[in-house]
Image: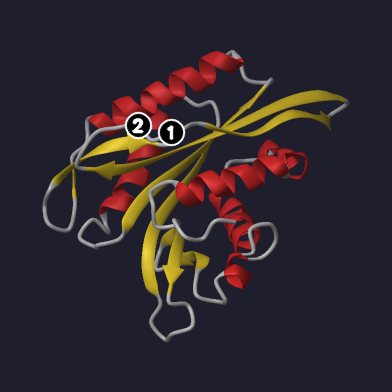
Amino acid sequence: MDINNLQQKFNLFSQSSSILNESSEHYLPRFNYSACELWLCTELCHLINFEGHKLQALSDGDLFLYNEDNKRDLTLYSSGKTKQPKILTHIEVKVIYPVAKSKFDNAINNLYQKLKSSRHSDYNQEGWIYLVWTQHYAVPLEDFFVSRIEWLKESLDSKAFFDHEDNQLRPHYAQVHNIADGSIAWRGEKKQIVVKAIAFSFAKDFREIL
C-alpha cells in the first residue's frame, strides 16, 4: 500500500476498491443482502488497517481508518500514536441497489448533508457510493450503472457546497471501479451480482480525476 499520498483525494478510495476487487469472490454474497453500510465500513477498516493494505504496520501506528466516529461513516486519521489524532478525510458511504429515482436522490442528499456538516473543517470530505445490480431487477445491467451515475451528477450539480473559508466548491468524481462481478447459488439457481463504486468530493475547479 502506498501511504505517502493518502491525503490526496480519492487515493484511499482507489486503493480500497482494488483490494475489494481482489477479494470479490469472498464479498460477492454479502452484496446479495439488504443495503447496509455498517458491515461494509467495518470490512473496509479491517482490510485497510490490517489484512491486505496493513496501514497500521506500514505507518508504525501513525495512520488508521476508523468507523462510526462522531457519526462519521469512516474517518482517516494521522498522528495515531498521540492522544489527539488528526482527521485527514471524512468519508460517508452508501450502498445503493436499483430503486426509483426519488429514493436514489434521497440517498445522495443524505450523503451530501452528512458531508456538509463538516464543511467548516480543513480536512477532505468524500462520498463513496457502491452501486449493486442483481439479475432479479428489471432494469438492464448497463442501463443501471449508466443511469445512476448520471443521476448522481445531476443531483450533486444542483447543490451548493462551501469550504471552511466560504469558497464555493464544485463536485468532482473518481473513476468508476469494478468491485465484483460473478454469480452465486441462490434459491436453486445462479444469481448474477455486479458491483461498481464511484466517489465524489468537492473542489474549487471542476474536473474528473482518473
Asked if marks 2 and 1 touch (Cβ < 8 Å), the reply is yes
> Quadrant where the C terminus lies?
top left
Closer to the camera, 36 or 5? 5
Q: Position of residue 124 (x, y in %)?
A: 32, 55
Residue 36 in sight from this viewpoint:
no
Determine whether the residue tagged by mark 1 lies in a helix, strand or loop.
loop
> Relative to residue 23, is residue 199 drawn left or right?
left
> Relative to residue 34, is residue 65 drawn left or right?
left
From the image, tell me which residue sits under label 1. Answer: 210
From the image, tell me which residue sits under label 2. Answer: 208
Q: Is residue 105 above or below residue 120?
A: above
Q: How are the residues colored? A: secondary structure
Outermost residue, right direction? 188
Determine whether the residue tagged by mark 2 lies in a helix, strand or loop.
loop
Which of the 4 image quarters holds residue 97?
top right
> Quadrant where the N terminus lies?
bottom right
